[in-house]
């Protein structure tokens, strides 16, 4: 590719190639301070290419390609090239990772113990993990939790947090302006702006944590807590995993180990301040 | 009544929680959530192919399931065996009963 950028996020090395310089320049800024892939070798490759040769100049739009692709994925306008690269990296992880059980969950750590938050898109798990990451917790990741089948630990995957719509203002009030990437308006998910994780999240990206609590947050209702049994938690996490089926027996062992060893709760919250209070209270009462 | 068979116990990994069983079936790679008496039926069937009445007798001895009302127990077990066959955890034993699997 004409333009390329390589980066390591926790245990995973990526190489992003692009037909245009702009997405690569944006990535260099967003990922400043991240290490290169180990031994210079990336685990996954993402390519941003024009849909037709002339579309490199004429109404340029980026098709996300790579080791793993979705056959019916739509191209994104070049102005959303950074988002296209991020989506491509997510796709490689979701479809290609085999070393860990991937849970669609955000994750933060304190005292070596991890709090996992899983839920549907829009449940607020990214915002909650980003806020906790500024308030005494270490951000392990806002998108994927990497559960190690052999040891049961969670490996950090501290990508820049993808803030959407209202969450952008919430975090802009919380962090220095240089921690935020460019505003990407009008994406399929609304406005998006990336948040660079705090310095300790990057400095300690090779330090795993032991799962201690699982939450399934839901934004928009009055504060409520409902303990969840191991079976319900197991079923929900198989649905939240992108590679449970391909991992086979290792995935079964990893997930049954997680749900039997860690308390799980569904929580409703009316606003982020209430959510943070709830998380801190449950952590103090429950996490083991 | 058809005779059913089951894979050897080593083909299944199971974890019990809250009165239910999470079962991983190695040959298919499929995970199942089972309610009683399905796990007990799989265990009893591992002793050898059996029809529902024979299984009811085995379970009456080992788990007191259907004790005192053999016909009802056999009907319940026949229904559960049908469900387990539909998800691939048991199969009709070829050439033993009146039907052939497949």
Image (cartoon, rainbow, N blue to C red):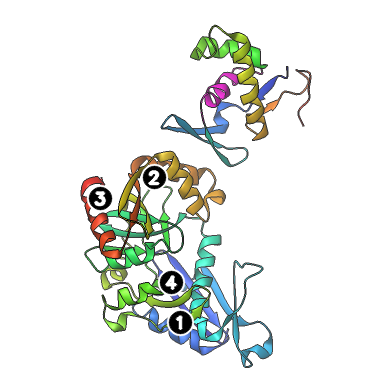
Give the CA distance from mark 3 to mark 4.
37 Å
Marked residue nearer the N-terminal end (2 or 1): 1
- Within-10-Å neighbours for mark 4: few <14, some 14–19, many 20+: some
Marked residue nearer the N-terminal end (1 or 3): 1
Label number found at residue A282: 3
Q: SS class of the residue under badge 2?
A: helix
Which of label 2 and label 3 is nearer to you? 3
Residue that carries the numbered disc 2 in the rendered image: A258
Q: Could you say where residue B38 lies in the image, as x and y percent from the top left?
A: 55, 26
Give the CA distance from mark 1 to mark 4.
27 Å
Give the CA distance from mark 2 to mark 3.
18 Å
Identify the chain of the residue marked 4, using the numbered disc in the image: A
Residue that carries the numbered disc 1 in the rendered image: A184
Q: SS class of the residue under badge 1?
A: strand
Q: Using the rendered view, name the quadrant where residue A248 is placed.
A: top right
Which of label 1 and label 4 is nearer to you? 1
Residue that carries the numbered disc 4 in the rendered image: A37
Q: Residue at x 53, y 23 (%)?
A: B37
Q: Residue at x 58, y 37 (%)?
A: B26
Q: Are marks 1 and 3 on the same chain?
A: yes
Q: Which residues are magenta?
A: B35-50
Which of label 3 and label 4 is nearer to you? 3
Q: Nearer the viewer, residue A145 or A203?
A: A145
């Amino acid at each position: 590719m004409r333009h390329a950028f390589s980066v390591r996020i926790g245990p995973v090395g990526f190489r992003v190639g692009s037909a245009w310089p702009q997405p690569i320049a944006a990535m260099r800024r967003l990922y400043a301070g991240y290490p290169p892939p180990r031994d210079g070798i990336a685990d996954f490759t993402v390519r941003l290419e024009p849909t037709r040769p002339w579309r490199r100049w004429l109404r340029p739009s980026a098709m996300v390609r790579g080791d793993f692709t979705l056959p019916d994925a739509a191209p994104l306008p070049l102005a959303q090239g950074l988002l296209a690269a991020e989506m491509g990296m997510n796709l490689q992880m979701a479809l290609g990772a085999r070393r860990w059980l991937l849970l669609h969950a955000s994750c933060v750590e304190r005292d070596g113990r991890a709090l996992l938050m899983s839920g549907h898109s829009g449940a607020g798990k990214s915002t909650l993990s980003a806020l906790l990451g500024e308030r005494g917790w270490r951000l392990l990741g806002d998108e994927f939790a990497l559960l190690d089948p052999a040891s049961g630990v969670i490996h950090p995957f501290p990508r820049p947090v993808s803030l959407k719509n209202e969450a952008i203002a919430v975090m802009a009030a919380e962090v220095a302006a240089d921690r935020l990437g460019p505003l990407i308006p009008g994406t399929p998910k609304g406005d998006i702006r990336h948040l660079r994780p705090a310095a300790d999240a990057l400095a300690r990206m090779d330090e795993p944590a032991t799962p201690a609590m699982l939450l399934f947050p839901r934004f928009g209702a009055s504060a409520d807590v409902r303990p969840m049994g191991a079976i319900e938690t197991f079923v929900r996490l198989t649905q939240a995993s992108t590679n449970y089926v391909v991992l086979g027996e290792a995935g079964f062992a990893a997930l049954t180990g997680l749900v039997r060893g860690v308390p799980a709760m569904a929580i409703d919250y009316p606003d982020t301040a209430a959510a943070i209070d709830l998380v801190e209270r449950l952590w103090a009462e429950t996490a083991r | 009544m058809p005779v059913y068979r089951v894979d050897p116990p080593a083909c299944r990994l199971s974890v019990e929680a809250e009165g239910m069983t999470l079962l991983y079936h190695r040959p298919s790679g499929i995970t199942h959530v089972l309610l009683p008496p399905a796990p007990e039926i799989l265990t009893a069937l591992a002793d050898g192919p059996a029809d529902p009445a024979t299984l009811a007798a085995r379970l009456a001895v080992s788990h007191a399931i259907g004790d005192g009302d053999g016909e009802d127990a056999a009907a319940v077990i026949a229904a559960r065996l049908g469900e387990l066959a539909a998800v691939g955890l048991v199969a009709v034993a070829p050439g033993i009963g009146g039907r052939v699997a497949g």
